[in-house]
């Protein structure tokens, strides 16, 4: 084989390798894009039994009068919340829905790190689940400012954002026209992580009382 022929063969091999790498990069990019979760849920949700989501391995059948085996916007929301394995950061204006409270308490029992931010006025109303979460040992902070804590978002495992107009109440889930966006897009998730951290530090009760004592001292 002549030297020129060998050079051509090597050159073609380099081109083929380059094209193969570009193709693999494109394919991996497409697969990664397909795996990125982006979902929208609308409410009010159809009312259906969600007991199986809390006891997926139970052999006992549920005999409640609600429809069974029906996937709804609410059941999808619960599934994404219950998918947490390491952390759940929740920032919500009003929290009185008992099934959502059950989901958070179940995660707490599974040693998932949970932090909750809520509005101080609405956390004190009848039916609020905030006191129940606190009693269970979940760390909850309420706003120390005069402005409403009007956010409605959750970050699951630092990777999944759940946000929208939906308050975590029975009325919002079953009666109101609401929306939820669920996404793993890092460009959207990261700002909410930063905002939660900012609000968590801002509403640290120790910091608030320290400032209060300092003001009284003057």
Image: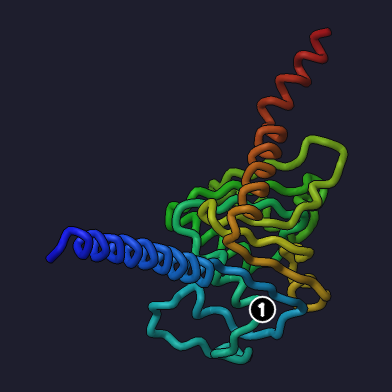
Left or right of 54? Residue 129 is: right
Could you tell me residue 69's position as x and y percent? Answer: 54, 90
Lateral position of residue 213 relative to residue 33, left or right: right
User: What residue is shown at x 62% (from left), y 48% (from top)?
Assistant: 190
What colouring style does the render use? rainbow
* Residue sitting farthest toward the top: 218
- Residue at the spot 78% in from the left edge and 35% down from the top edge: 144
Mark 1 surroundings: few (<14), some (14-19) or many (≥20) residues within 10 A: some
| Residue 132 visible at all | no
Helix, strand or loop at mark 1: helix
Residue 152 visible in rendering:
yes
Which is more toward the observer, 4 or 206?
4
Q: Is residue 156 left or right of residue 42?
A: left
Give the residue at the far left of this rendering.
1
Residue at which label 1 appears? 73
- Report x, y in % for residue 180: 71, 68
Q: Which quarter of the image is occupied by the N terminus?
A: bottom left
Quarter in which the C terminus is drawn: top right
How many dots with numbers? 1
Along the viewing direction, whichever of 12 and 40 lies nearer the viewer? 12
Front in this rendered view, residue 115 or 80: 80
Q: Position of residue 95 (x, y in %)?
A: 72, 59
**Quadrant of res 202:** top right
Residue at x-position 66% and y-position 55%: 188
């Amino acid at each position: 084989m002549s030297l020129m022929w060998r050079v051509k063969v090597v050159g073609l091999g380099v081109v083929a390798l380059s094209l193969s790498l570009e193709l693999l990069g494109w394919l991996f990019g497409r697969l990664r894009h397909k795996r990125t979760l982006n979902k929208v849920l609308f409410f009010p949700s159809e009312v259906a039994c969600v007991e199986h989501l809390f006891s997926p391995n139970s052999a006992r059948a549920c005999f409640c009068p609600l429809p069974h085996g029906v996937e709804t916007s609410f059941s999808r929301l619960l599934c994404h919340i219950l998918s947490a394995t390491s952390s759940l950061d929740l920032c919500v204006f009003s929290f009185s829905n008992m099934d959502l409270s059950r989901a958070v308490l179940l995660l707490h029992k599974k040693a998932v790190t949970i932090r909750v931010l809520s509005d101080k006025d609405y956390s004190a109303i009848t039916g609020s689940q905030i006191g129940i979460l606190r009693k269970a040992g979940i760390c909850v902070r309420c706003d120390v400012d005069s402005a409403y804590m009007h956010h409605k978002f959750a970050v699951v495992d630092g990777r999944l954002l759940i946000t929208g107009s939906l308050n975590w109440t029975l009325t919002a889930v079953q009666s109101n026209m609401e929306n939820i966006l669920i996404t793993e897009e890092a460009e959207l998730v990261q700002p909410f992580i930063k905002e939660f951290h900012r609000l968590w530090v801002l509403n640290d009760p120790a910091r608030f009382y320290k400032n209060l004592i300092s003001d009284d001292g003057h």
